[in-house]
């Protein structure tokens, strides 16, 4: 069942996703060699709570932390740990969710630790751009497949892998609403996009093969070939005049100055 949101509900979703953007910016400022992913989780959780929200991920289906932090070959759902220390050249995908005023925010960003290899930087840039390509298709009258195909075609044009096992989703009072939003698919297929729908688009793109494995902690997803992966996510409302992005990456990019 797909829930159509009123303008007021969309503004509450925007508030949540702006808080997520600010949290990712705050976490991003602390992404330096030597910091542990558990410390980043603490900073994010503190920021969320001090702004009147609760971390949407904590306790979700038993998830044990407030952020998902996925370093290098981890694709998504990495569990923060005091033993995981960032080093120069790593890439770090941080996924963050908030809950306040009855609605959820959910967005993710991949950060570089210092200078990263040029081919890794290209993977990050292409993954973010694939999200923008998908977003441009998020308009009333299109179908989910138009979004999916735009993401897939762009990412695959570089020879990158598009992870199949996980996908984007509707966003509202619950973190995961219908429709599912795969990162691969065919134009003109899938559910019709209508004004008032809000979806999260979240490409998970690998430098090598698209195959992933689920680790024994029950959460962490990593690439089978151990090559790096990137993940960017934001929430988009389908409006009369086109896609309305509720997350603000510019807040994050100002904080890390790029
Ligand atoms: N952004 C992720 C998603 O869209 C967050 C889920 S992680 C969990 O599915 F920890 F909350 F499960
Ligand atoms: Co999501």
Image (cartoon, rainbow, N blue to C red):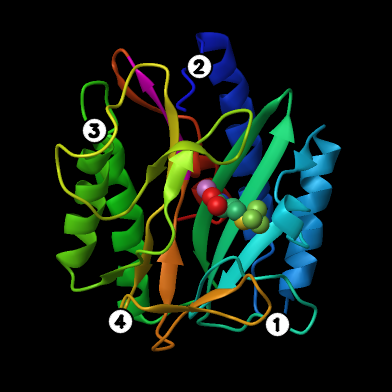
Residue designated by label 4:
208
Point 35% across, 64% down: residue: 164
Q: Are marks 1 and 4 in contact (CB under 8 Å)?
A: no
- Name above or below for residue 81 compared with residue 148: below
- Is residue 29 among what the camera can see? no
Residue designated by label 3:
143
Per the image, label 3 sits on a secondary structure element best described as: loop
Q: Is residue 149 left or right of residue 18?
A: left
Tag of residue 5? 2
Q: Is residue 46 left or right of residue 120?
A: right
Whether the residue carrying mark 2 lies under 8 Å from ligand 2 is answered with: no
Query: In which quadrant of the rendered view does residue 16 lie?
Result: top right
Q: Are marks 1 and 2 in contact (CB under 8 Å)?
A: no
Please say whether residue 236 is one of the residues in the magenta stretch. yes
Compare marks 1 and 4 and give the one earlier in the sequence. Answer: 1
Q: Which residues are magenta?
A: 234-239
Compare marks 3 and 1 and give the one earlier in the sequence. Answer: 1
- Name above or below for residue 10 compared with residue 76: above
Q: Residues within 10 Å of mark 2 (few under 14, many from 20)?
A: some
How far is disc 4 from disc 2 in space, using C-alphas? 39 Å
Query: In which quadrant of the rendered view does residue 190 lie?
Result: top left
Per the image, label 2 sits on a secondary structure element best described as: loop
Tag of residue 85? 1
- Which of pointers 4 and 2 indicates the residue nearer the eye? 2
């Amino acid at each position: 069942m797909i829930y159509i949101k009123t303008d007021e509900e969309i503004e509450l979703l925007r508030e949540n996703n702006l808080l997520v953007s600010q949290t990712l910016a705050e976490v991003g400022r602390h992404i330096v060699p030597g910091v542990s992913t558990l410390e980043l989780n603490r900073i994010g959780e503190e920021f969320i709570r001090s702004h009147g929200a609760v971390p949407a991920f904590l306790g979700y289906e038993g998830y044990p932390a407030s952020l998902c932090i996925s370093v290098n070959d981890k694709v998504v759902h990495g569990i923060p740990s005091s033993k995981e220390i960032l080093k120069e050249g790593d890439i770090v995908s941080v996924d963050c969710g908030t809950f306040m005023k009855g609605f959820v925010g959910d967005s993710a960003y991949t950060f570089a630790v210092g200078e990263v290899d040029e081919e890794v930087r290209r993977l990050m840039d292409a993954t973010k751009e694939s999200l923008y390509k998908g977003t441009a298709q998020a308009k009333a009258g299109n179908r989910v497949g138009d979004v999916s195909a735009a993401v897939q075609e762009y990412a695959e044009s570089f020879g990158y892998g598009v992870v199949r096992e996980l996908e984007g989703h509707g966003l509202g009072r619950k973190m995961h609403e219908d429709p599912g939003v795969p990162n691969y698919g065919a134009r003109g297929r899938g559910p019709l996009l209508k004004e008032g729908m809000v979806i999260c688009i979240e490409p998970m793109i690998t430098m090598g093969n698209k195959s992933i494995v689920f680790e024994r902690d029950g959460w962490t997803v990593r690439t089978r070939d151990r090559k790096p992966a990137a993940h960017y996510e934001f929430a988009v409302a389908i409006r009369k005049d086109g896609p309305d992005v509720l997350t603000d990456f510019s807040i994050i990019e100002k904080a890390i100055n790029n």
